[in-house]
Image (tube, helix red, strand yellow):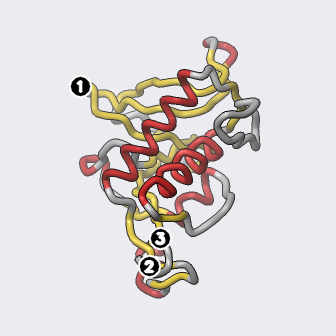
């Protein structure tokens, strides 16, 4: 509810109007995430290297960069420059799992504490397919990968739609 309060209390930022990201921006952010995956991007905590670059990112760095690129493609900007996976929840509209569409945010963690963020791809039967940046050497994961968990998995804490802002004059 706090997210909606922020949106209602501050509808105009210095650069434009704040809105939930339109579908074309969410889909484009997902396309950029696939580029990171296809380039073999590794994982580094705090990383958010731009394309092309040394190519290491962490989970929030992947989401931020992909949304920055997608926003630029459609004449929008993000209302922040950098934040953590937990911080991203402040910049997203809370949505129900059943309303997820490609490019929406999956907030994940353990014991109800958000420590990870991923981009929703699609429902695959009883699973949620997503793309993220993570380091799990015990299962051979180091970087940006496409994975899936059962939609009832306790690691899913909440779901969101990124806020973007129109550039001044749009």
Image location (x, y in percent) of residue 9: 46, 87
Q: Secondary structure at mark 3?
A: strand
Q: Earlier in the sequence, mark 3 or mark 2?
A: 2
Vertical arrangement, residue 54 with respect to residue 158, above or below: above
Residue nearest the viewer, comparing 103 with 66: 66
Residue at 61% across, 50% down:
85
Residue at 66% across, 53% down:
84
Q: Quadrant of the N terminus?
A: bottom left
* Residue 110 in which image quadrant: top right
Question: Mark 1 = which residue?
Answer: 125
Mark 3 crowd level (few <14, some 14–19, many ≥20, 10 Å Cα): many
Is 57 left or right of 71, judged from the image as shown? Answer: right
Question: Mark 3 = which residue?
Answer: 165
Label 1 and label 2: CA atoms lie apart by: 37 Å
Residue at 63% across, 30% down:
134
Q: Secondary structure at mark 1?
A: loop
Is 144 left or right of 157, judged from the image as shown? Answer: right
Q: Earlier in the sequence, mark 1 or mark 2?
A: 2
């Amino acid at each position: 509810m706090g997210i909606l309060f922020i949106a209602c209390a501050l509808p105009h930022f210095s650069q434009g109007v704040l809105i939930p990201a339109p579908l074309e921006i969410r889909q484009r952010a997902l396309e950029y995430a696939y580029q990171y995956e296809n380039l073999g991007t590794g994982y580094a905590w705090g990383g958010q290297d731009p394309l092309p670059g040394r190519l290491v990112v962490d989970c929030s760095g992947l989401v931020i960069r992909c949304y920055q690129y997608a926003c630029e493609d459609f004449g929008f900007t993000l209302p922040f420059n950098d934040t953590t996976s937990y911080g991203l929840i402040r910049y997203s509209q809370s949505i129900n799992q059943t309303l997820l569409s490609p490019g929406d945010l999956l907030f994940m963690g353990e014991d109800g504490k958000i420590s990870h963020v991923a981009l929703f791809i699609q429902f695959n039967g009883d699973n949620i397919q997503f793309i993220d940046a993570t380091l799990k050497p015990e299962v051979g994961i180091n970087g940006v990968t496409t994975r899936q968990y059962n939609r009832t998995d306790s690691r899913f804490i909440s779901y969101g739609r990124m806020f973007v802002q129109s550039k001044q004059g749009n």
